[in-house]
Amino acid sequence: MLNLVPSAFMASFPWHRVRLAWPFAVIVALMLVLCNASLDVMSGMRALSNAEGARSKALAYAVRDLEQYAQMRDDDAFWAARRVAAFTDELIRAAVHTGEYSDPAAEKYLGDVLIKRRDKIASTYLTAVNPIVAPRLDANGRLTFENAAIAAGVANGPATYRASWLRFDNATGETQALSETQSSTTTIEVPSGVPTASGSFIAVDISADSEGHPSWRRPIRTYFRRAADGWTLVGLERLPETLSADPAVKSSTR
């Protein structure tokens, strides 16, 4: 027969304390669960806040870059394109190789894309303005220079180069026309009548006639100063505001 009489232990157990304590235990357990959930929520909010901060910063940088691009002049783009065009295929592929791609096909693809992007930048911006660079006036009476677009392979000749020679007063900025010369090469002979006294200044407007590139007809203006050992380039304006009167020559060149 089943004995339903409680044992001495059960009879002596302090059940009244259990009845008082279990609600507090349940409340503490619920608080721990809620705290853990709150920490997860706070962590998520912090991550969201950081992401929003990074997004806002990226947008600010993008807006700044777009503003700078909108203010960019054609001569600014020409200068930047020359820097980009200076990277050879070998240099670009060597730079990509430092990324240590595990897939050789991915490394080759990225190199191909960057090379095509370089070529597109060069063909777009090196031909947009008169591409004459590195003018030099030697003591033997020859003006030499380079055509950056042709040198980069993004334009073809032939071209006829023209030079307008002017006496330049560095104190007042006034000019006086002297002569005009031209050549089918990047070497032009200096005409007679150009001042040769030490300390003299001259301005030379150099342009090019090339089919398909009407912007090349707009001259660049170069400034040279005569010294005892020859001529020194002291100024270059790729997009001069005027070709009749210019401010005094600045010491920097572009």
Image: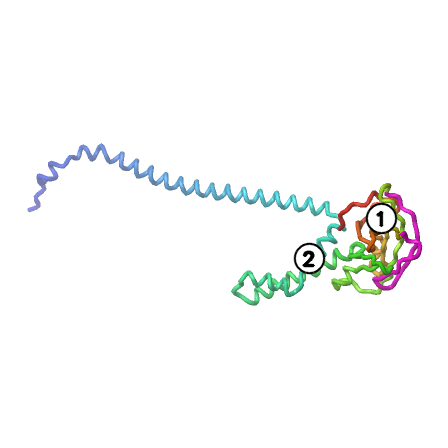
The residue to which callout 1 is attached is: 199
> In the rendering, at what x and y percent does residue 15 appear?
17, 35
- Snapshot colouring: rainbow
Q: Quadrant of residue 22?
A: top left
Point out which mark residue 183 bears.
none
Label 1 SS: loop
Mark sitting on residue 84:
2
Q: CA distance from mark 2 to mark 1?
A: 37 Å
Q: Is residue 108 left or right of residue 30?
A: right
Q: Is residue 46 left or right of residue 135?
A: left
Residue at the extreme left of the image, as rendered:
1
Q: Position of residue 83 (x, y in %)?
A: 69, 56
State which region is magenta: 173-195
Which mark is nearer the camera, 2 or 1?
A: 1
Looking at the image, can residue 37 be seen? yes
Q: Which kind of residue does numbered mark 2 sit on? A: Val
> Which of the pair 139/222 is nearer the observer?
139
Instruction: Determine whether the residue tagged by mark 2 lies in a helix, strand or loop.
Output: helix
Q: Residues within 10 Å of mark 1 (few under 14, many from 20)?
A: few
- Tell whether position 56 is magenta: no
Residue occupying the far front of the picture: 228
Name the one closer to the observer, 168 or 154. 168
In the picture provided, is 215 more to the left or to the right than 62?
right
Residue at the (84%, 53%) spot, across then down: 219
